[in-house]
Amino acid sequence: MGRFAPTPSGRMHLGNVFAALLAWLSVRSRDGEMVLRMEDLDTQRTSGEYARILREDLLWLGLTWDRETPAQSTRGQVYDGYFHRLEELGLLYPCYCTRSRLHSADAPHLSDGTYVYPGTCRNLTAEQREHYHRAPAWRVLVPDREWVIHDRVQGESRWNLATDCGDMVVRRADGVYVYQLAVTVDDGESGVTEVVRGMDLLSSAPRQMYLQELFGFPHPEYAHVPLLLAPDGRRLSKRDRDLDLGQLRLRMSAQALVGILACCAGLTDRSEPISLEELTGEFSWEKIRPEPVYLDPKMLTE
Ligand code: GLU
């Protein structure tokens, strides 16, 4: 079982379409099922209207799903249950660190700009906690052990959460559950066995594998697909408005767009219009290269 897990905060951009296409082909080439879930935890940035347009855009592309599971914004009570399990396991502690403190010089930063939480609030006494007079975020203790990911596209990689990120926030101070917890619970409860998404989320996989283990969910297969880059190496993103689906739909057919992306993925050698049925027969993860894909926006805008 595969899934689409879009964030309804705008029109789909090319990278989203690329990941959704490969997720769909992988599942359909094996007669599997697809679920759709709206990842709208951030209620400030997301909307029901964007969710509606997203469904419509997926259907325009022909990327169908078998059922839609409830949007994350409606699942606070379910996440509460999993949060309490972590509490019962004795793995949670309140964290009062402010953003500026976390980004200050004494927190070790990794080369990609992220930081490793140094455990500042791990051993606070009850008295020290009271002193803060504000709602804390909640962190889960992470073990000092290795996680090995066998990614269908990126190959094998090894991670250790203790040195890669430190104890992870699972609930923010405003009570909102974080992406890592919500995704783990939702994928686990809906029986997702294959997670296909952009390469930028590879480092989330070990975090989610850890939570899967704590919650008793099996690990899904992972396929982190390459990012799409402009010829100058810049990542194509939501900011490239002329490359979002709203604009692209005015300029080309779904089959033309699918043809271009299938060629980028290495599934075909000519970027000609192609139907999803034809592509399903061509699909195999072995054909998908791990390197970023360079795509000249001119191919799509002229
Ligand atoms: N909601 C995320 C996004 O739209 C995807 C998360 C995931 O696939 O795990 O980028």
Image: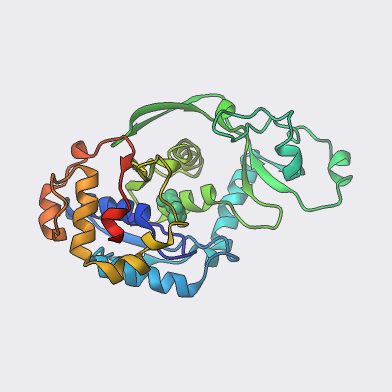
Quadrant of the drawing holding the C terminus: bottom left
Left or right of residue 273, residue 103 in this image: right
In front: 112, or 38? 112
Q: Is residue 289 visible?
A: yes
Q: Is residue 1 visible?
A: no
Residue 120 percent coordinates (x, y): 75, 33
**Residue at left offset 44%, top offset 63%:** 38
Q: How many marks?
A: 0
In the image, residue 51 above or below residue 227: below
In front: 187, or 248? 248
Left or right of residue 141, residue 229 in this image: left
Residue 246 percent coordinates (x, y): 37, 69
In front: 149, or 252? 252
Left or right of residue 166, residue 51 in this image: left
In the image, residue 54 above or below residue 3: below
Residue 60 percent coordinates (x, y): 26, 70
Residue 91 percent coordinates (x, y): 64, 38
In the image, residue 252 above or below residue 202: below
State the colouring used for the structure image: rainbow
**Residue at left offset 14%, top offset 61%:** 275
**Residue at left offset 35%, top offset 67%:** 247
In front: 179, or 86? 179
**Residue at left offset 83%, top offset 43%:** 129
Left or right of residue 127, residue 120 in this image: left
